Image: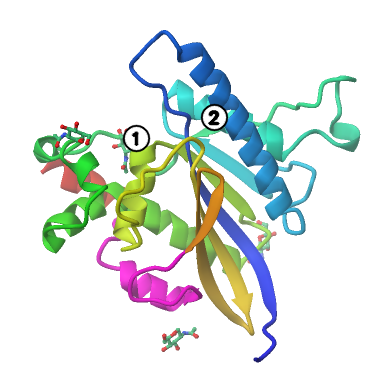
Amino acid sequence: MAVRLILFTSAFAFVTSYYVPGSKSNLLSVIQVGKQQHYDLGQYARIRYDNFLSKKYTKEEFRVEATNSDRTFMSAASNVAGLFPPIGDQIWKIGLNWQPIPVFPVEIAFNYRLPKWTESVFPQPLTNLTSILFTSFSFNEELQKITTGPFLKTLIEHFEGYIANSTSTQKYKQFSCHDINLSSILISLGAYIPGTLPGFASTIFFELREINGIHYINIFYRNDGILIPITVAGCNFDCNLTDFKNIVSNLIISVEEWYAVCKS
Ligand SMILES: *[C@@H]1O[C@H](CO)[C@@H](O)[C@H](O)[C@H]1NC(C)=O
Ligand SMILES: *[C@@H]1O[C@H](CO)[C@@H](O)[C@H](O)[C@H]1NC(C)=O
Ligand SMILES: *[C@@H]1O[C@H](CO)[C@@H](O)[C@H](O)[C@H]1NC(C)=O
Ligand SMILES: *[C@@H]1O[C@H](CO)[C@@H](O)[C@H](O)[C@H]1NC(C)=O
């Protein structure tokens, strides 16, 4: 077997916020569990990316964005507390192993309303459809464009930006969003595993790796604490960036196009 030089260059993580069920009685305990799981996920990411991401938080290397809800902001805050405990001159209060790290509102079209016509399919039966296989491809492609098009565009631009100039692009970018958003992405990539739904603090990691001078995307899905590799339909696990772009090209839309589709 040939020895491959693997250089890990950039990462992009999608994390679900903790889930608050309808019942109010156990709301507090759910919130506490949610915080703990996000903190644990932050520690997990610290171990996974320790050789790649500096222990010290800087805005040049890391950025976290959250969709517009209190849950996703709190999840993100719990998460970065585990990922970036203060070290050295960042320690500002003895005995407090925490530092403030900014959480930004999402820049991509994740949190806006779906167009009127999708109300007949969203959130139901679309949400239930995520646990069974597609029935009609074209029907789904139109929806996938709306649910994941701007995200896929941001992802590719991020990685291309990093390849073009690694000093002007963050090494690690994280989004705090909702479980439906994760399912949408897996479905769009043709990598949805029937019967699974994203749980607390579930995450999709997109990693850009350079192997013998070629850039590949590797995708991992972490759900219930188990990390599994994800293979994009029509590609290998090591999916070169060119192939990845071609595969998702039908789905990619800009935020402007997204607004146009959603107005019609
Ligand atoms: C969605 O799935 C749930 C759980 O299986 C079921 O109770 C509900 O009736 C389904 N809703 C629709 C609109 O299919
Ligand atoms: C993400 O989830 C939120 C909340 O469920 C929803 O309003 C939004 O439309 C979703 N966005 C995408 C792109 O799936
Ligand atoms: C890369 O970005 C940095 C910071 O923005 C800038 O100073 C530098 O000139 C850029 N390098 C190239 C090759 O564009
Ligand atoms: C990516 O892979 C395809 C075949 O799967 C190949 O044709 C193409 O040259 C590769 N691109 C790069 C940049 O290696």
* Beta carbon at label 1 within 8 Å of ligand 2: yes
Looking at the picture, tell me which residue is in the foreground, 107 or 40: 40
Per the image, the residue denoted by label 1 is 111
The image quadrant that residue 168 belongs to is: bottom right
Q: Nearer the viewer, residue 63 or 86?
A: 86
Left/right placement of residue 255 relative to residue 200 reads: left
Q: Which span of residues is magenta-colored?
A: 230-254
Q: Residue furthest bottom?
A: 1
One can see residue 109 in this view: no
User: Ligand 2 shows up in which quadrant of the image?
Assistant: top left
Q: Is residue 204 left or right of residue 166?
A: left
Q: Secondary structure at mark 1?
A: loop
Q: Is residue 190 visible?
A: yes
Q: Is residue 244 magenta?
A: yes
Name which residue lies at 44% across and 77% down: 236
Which residue sits at x=34%, y=62%? 189
Mark drawn on residue 75: 2
**Classed neighbour count for the residue bearing mark 1: other residues with Cα under 10 Å, few (<14), some (14–19), many (≥20):** some
Kind of residue at badge 2: Ser
- Residue 108 is left or right of residue 90, and the answer is left
Q: Is residue 61 magenta?
A: no
Q: Secondary structure at mark 2?
A: helix
